[in-house]
Image (spheres, rainbow, N blue to C red):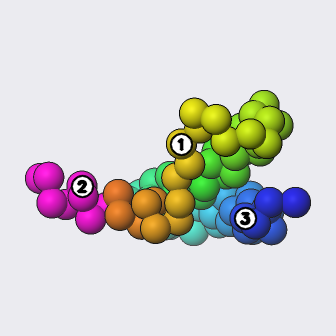
Amino acid sequence: MLKGEPFKIICYLILIALTLLANITYIPVNFQVAIHTITIVYIGSIHSIRLYSKEVNTGDEGVEKLTQRDAWMFPIFGIYLI
């Protein structure tokens, strides 16, 4: 089981709850889009990690890995380059 696997289930529940709640009451569109985007990207990331871990054997020959620190630096570099 991957590290983020339990949070994937929570993301599915958030998507379902937000969709149902939007049918009952008014939720600002910007909020809906932001939450949907964040959860869908997270779910896709978990699925791609699972797919990647099945395809690549355990050897590290020629494989670059992205660490958590690298991932946190993306927004900082994005703001810096603007």
Q: Nearer the viewer, mark 2 or mark 1?
A: 1
Amino acid found under the numbered disc labelled 2: Gly
Q: Secondary structure at mark 2?
A: helix
Can residue 20 be seen from the camera position used here? no
Please tell me which of labels 3 and 1 falls first in the chain.
Answer: 3
Residue 21 shown left or right of residue 71 in the figure: right
Which residue is more in the foreground, 27 or 78? 78
Callout 3: few (<14), some (14-19), or many (20+) C-alpha neighbours within 10 Å?
A: few
Residue range corresponding to the magenta coloring? 75-82
The x, y position of residue 30, in whole percent, is 38, 59
For residue 46, above or below residue 10: above
Which is more N-terminal, label 1 or label 2?
1
Observer able to see residue 8: yes
Q: For the stretch drawn in magenta, what is the main secondary structure?
A: helix
Which comes sooner in the sequence, label 3 or label 2? 3
In the rendered image, the vertical position of residue 69 relative to residue 12, given as above or below: below
User: Please, what is the three-letter code of the amino acid marked with disc 1?
Assistant: Glu
The numbered disc on residue 64 is 1
User: Which residue has dot 3 on it?
Assistant: 4
Q: Quadrant of residue 4?
A: bottom right
Q: Residue at x 60, y 55 (%)?
A: 42
